[in-house]
Structure formats: C-alpha cells, structure tokens
Amino acid sequence: MLGELSPAFTIVGEAAEAGAVADAARRRAADVVVYDEDSLGSASVLASVAQLAPQRPARAVVLLGLDAGDSCREYLRAGARGLLFRDGGADELGFAVRSVAEGGVYLTPRLAGVIVRPLVRSGRPGGPAGRPVGRGDPLTLRQTEILDLMLTGVSNAEIAAELSLSEKTVKFHVSNILGKLNLKNRTQVLAHLMGGRITAEGGPEKG
C-alpha cells in the first residue's frame, strides 16, 4: 500500500515475526518500521518496539486493532512515534510515516483523546475526575480539545481553523495548558504523556 501511495517510499523489507524486526531494520538501514498489531500480536509488537527504540534513525509506527485500549500509552513509553488504527486508510498511514521519518510524532485524532483524558480532570460539571496533572488545576473542555489536537502535531493555525477560533486565542489556550501542566513546550507535553521525567532542556529524561 505504501509503495503504491508514493514513489518517495522505498520498502526495504518485511518480517513475519516481530522478534526479527529490530535486527532487520538495523541491517537494512530502515528509517521507519510499520507494525501491524493484529498480525503480530500486541505483546510481540510492544517488545519489538522497545528493542527497536535505541536504534536510531529507525522509528516505529504501529497500526492498532480497533479494540486497542491502554496499550497505546505502553507503545509510547516503549518508544513508538506513530499510532493509528489499521482502518485509517493509505493517506493517513502515508502522513504518519512521513511525519515520523522527519523526526515528528503522529497520533491519530481518534486516539489522542483516549490518551489525554485519563491524564486530565474533566471540565464537565459532575464529570469523573482523572489523575491530576501539573499543579492540579483542571483543564477546561476547550483546553482538552486543543490538547487533543496538539498531540496530532498540527500547528496553532490549523487548530484555530479546526475549532473556528482565532490563532491568538489558540496561543492563549496553549500557554495556559502548558502552565497548568508545568511544562514549557509541546515536546515536554509528549514526554509527560509517555510517563517520562522532564529535563531542563525540554526532552524526556531516560532512566
């Protein structure tokens, strides 16, 4: 499917077992590895992603089954940089692979809310309380919507267009979100969601 989507993609190999992926990616100098969770099994894919993560520049994109639940955060902690559902279509897969190959992160919009909601308190009156983040101040519903979109890698201008807001208003909300999370930038937001500690420079601290 990727080969037919764009001549910019070069398929350097396939592996029938997740355990063989990391070694094959290293030998064939792969930039991105695409895993199919349904074909390989979530436990095998998770172990392989963790094995692949230290090997740069290879980065993992995982096609999730429709019943994916908490495993999405486990994949992020293991080092995956792209998560989308396997029924998302060729265009979304191509966009995810390009984003990850360029050093970015892609989380399908359908999944972003699943990752964010357990980390923030609901702004809906009487709604369930999640685990507090940052200073413990709750995010509003609008801030949660914007955080969901931030996780997909879109710009402030694109968020503004999606939510019919001015870019100035989006910047204001982003600043407040970062303040409530006690974070400095979007890179730190991702590290926070992956359960990592934050260094002064803004990246996730290993260990």
Image: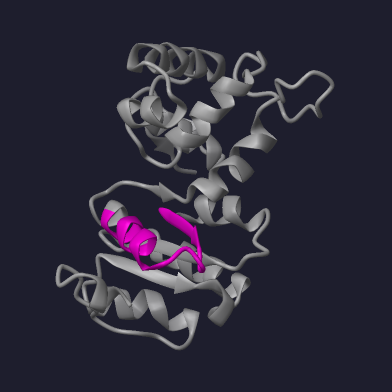
Percent coordinates x, y for residue 181 in the rendering? 54, 20
Q: Quadrant of residue 11?
A: bottom left
- Give me the residue at 51% from left, 56% from top: 78
Give the residue furthest to the bottom: 16
- Give me the residue at 24% from left, 78% from top: 3
Res. 80 visible in picture: no
* Start-end of magenta stretch: 81-98
Percent coordinates x, y for residue 66 in the rendering? 63, 65
Any magenta on residue 91? yes
Q: Is residue 70 left or right of residue 200?
A: right
The total of numbered circles placed on residues is 0
Give the residue furthest to the left: 7
Percent coordinates x, y for residue 4 in the rendering? 24, 78
Q: Is residue 46 left or right of residue 34?
A: right
Q: Quadrant of residue 82?
A: bottom left
Res. 64 visible in picture: yes
Give the residue furthest to the front: 164
* Residue 136 against residue 12 in the figure, above or below: above
* Residue 166 against residue 196 in the figure, above or below: above
* Residue 88 against residue 163 in the figure, above or below: below
- Give me the residue at 52% from left, 35% from top: 148
Percent coordinates x, y for residue 112 in the rendering? 54, 43
Q: Nearer the viewer, residue 176 or 193?
A: 176
Any magenta on residue 95? yes
Which quadrant would the N terminus be assigned to in this image?
bottom left
Q: Is residue 28 left or right of residue 171?
A: left
- Give me the residue at 48% from left, 79% from top: 18
